[in-house]
Image (cartoon, rainbow, N blue to C red):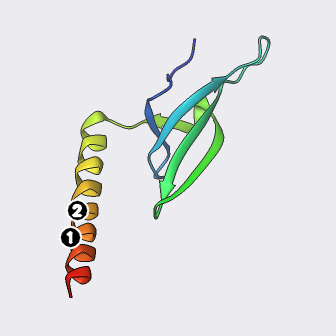
Amino acid sequence: MSKFKPGDVVRLEGGEMMTIGGIFKRKRAKHVYYFCQWFEKDEPYDGMFAEEDLELVPIAEVKKEIKRYNTERASRLKGEHNANKE
């Protein structure tokens, strides 16, 4: 059985938050691998990671990051809007 499911938010120790997009396991393989997707400076990335290298991010931390991102984005959009008025 897999430790994570698609849609879970995980990270490598101390790394960026990533979303699980898929699970890969061969019938006789010992390891489970996850296809993960994430953003760095608005650039999308993806990669495959072994289950033992990932940790689940607590939902409270995910919500805090979403709030921070939305606040930042709103400020940036407001700045662009004001610049267009000038």
Residue in front for this viewpoint, 38 or 76: 76
Query: Horizontal placement of 24 versus 10: left or right?
Result: right
Q: Name the residue under label 1.
A: 78
Q: Which residue is drawn at 29% across and 34% down?
A: 59
Label disc, if present, on residue 12 of the rendered structure: none
Query: Horizontal placement of 22 versus 66: left or right?
Result: right
Label 1's element?
helix
Label disc, if present, on residue 74 of the rendered structure: 2
Most distant residue in the right direction: 28
Residue type, numbered disc 2: Ala
- Dividing the picture into quadrants, the one containing residue 30 is top right
- Dividing the picture into quadrants, the one containing residue 53 is top right
Above or below, 29 against 66 in this view is above
Tell me where residue 9 appears, x and y as whole percent.
42, 36
Above or below, 23 against 35 in this view is above
Tell me where residue 16 appears, x and y as whole percent.
46, 52
Q: Residue at x 21, y 59 (%)?
A: 71
Above or below, 42 against 23 in this view is below
Label 2's element?
helix
Residue type, numbered disc 1: Lys
Measure the C-alpha gap from mark 2 to mark 1: 6 Å
Query: Horizontal placement of 70 versus 25: left or right?
Result: left
